[in-house]
Amino acid sequence: MVKPMSDDHPPSLRVAEQDFRWADVTLRQYKDEDAAPFKTVSRQVLFSDPKLAGELRYFEVAPDGYSTLERHDHMHAVMILRGAGKVLVGDKVHDVKTHDLITIPSWTWHQFRPAPGENLGFLCLVNAERDRPQLPSSEELAALRADAKVAAFLDGTG
Amino acid sequence: MVKPMSDDHPPSLRVAEQDFRWADVTLRQYKDEDAAPFKTVSRQVLFSDPKLAGELRYFEVAPDGYSTLERHDHMHAVMILRGAGKVLVGDKVHDVKTHDLITIPSWTWHQFRPAPGENLGFLCLVNAERDRPQLPSSEELAALRADAKVAAFLDGTG
């Protein structure tokens, strides 16, 4: 028997709850490890469906946390949904606030950091089919850090 | 000469401005016509890129307005971003508020209406490649209106 298509979908309505949680959406808290290239980041996959070529995820970085510094072939289309902070895109550091749009092209280094005392939450649209992220080599990291503003951002002091 | 890939992208940062407008994003106001099956709806395309399989648009319906009642093969993945209202999905009317998620499966009738005195703004993720919407025939409209709650929604009295 063929499974009805509607079974692949979440309910028509998933309500927004307190603190940027959603009904029927699993929150995945990344584990904090000294060796891990991220800190206090959570992920909720809001839309992922066989009928959709894109996926919409909500990431949240807690105060003093940061997302992984990485790059990849696939593109990110981002809208800040909660709080404010800074975003590194390539060799530029941008101040961002709620509802700002950020475009991260292919093979561009990027990292998200909340403003002091804030949570930084953002929607991220990606292709459902995509490559795995690449981390910077020590040479690539040194090249990024050659810019004083980028170095301060990466140290969390920018 | 091959055009650099980066030329296809918007700036890395497009800031959110007042009243759910964005820098470097064109607002398209749909024309109000008596014959048109929508009323006071605007559209801003936030992300549309050759490297993205999905597109993210922001629609806003002014008080007393409504989106087109339609269906199509492609799916909609929606997040309310501004205000509150009601959404018809198939034969069900849902109350919705900011940050709620709405899934509109293939070939499912749908329409958005703001709550009295409110603007209803929402993000809508679709596949970049998609079919054209279909409008209801008079028979299909009559079938929808057979449900009193749906009829009240369609009359804007629900």
Image (cartoon, coloured by chain):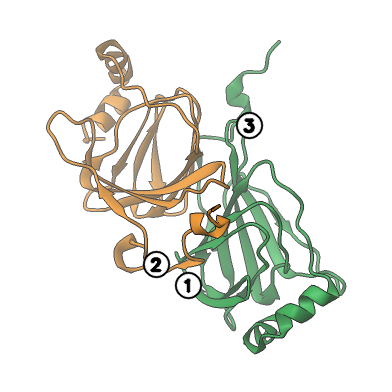
Chain colours: A green, B orange
Drawn side of residue A59 relative to residue B132, left or right: right
Amino acid type indicated by mark 2: Ala
The picture places residue B135, in percent across and down from the top left corner, at: 31, 22
Q: CA distance from mark 3 to mark 1?
A: 32 Å
Q: Quadrant of the C terminus of chain A?
A: bottom right
Q: Residue at x 73, y 65 (%)?
A: A70
Q: CA distance from mark 2 to mark 1?
A: 8 Å
Q: Quadrant of the N terminus of chain A?
A: top right
Q: Are marks 2 and 1 on the same chain?
A: no
Q: Secondary structure at mark 3?
A: loop
Using the image, name the chain to which the residue with label 2 belongs. Answer: B
Classed neighbour count for the residue bearing mark 2: other residues with Cα under 10 Å, few (<14), some (14–19), many (≥20): many
**Which residue is tagged 1?**
A97
The picture places residue A121, in percent across and down from the top left corner, at: 57, 65
Amino acid type indicated by mark 3: Pro
Q: Are marks 3 and 1 on the same chain?
A: yes
Residue A157 in view (yes/no): no
Q: Are marks 3 and 2 on the same chain?
A: no
- Callouts 2 and 1 close, C-beta under 8 Å: yes
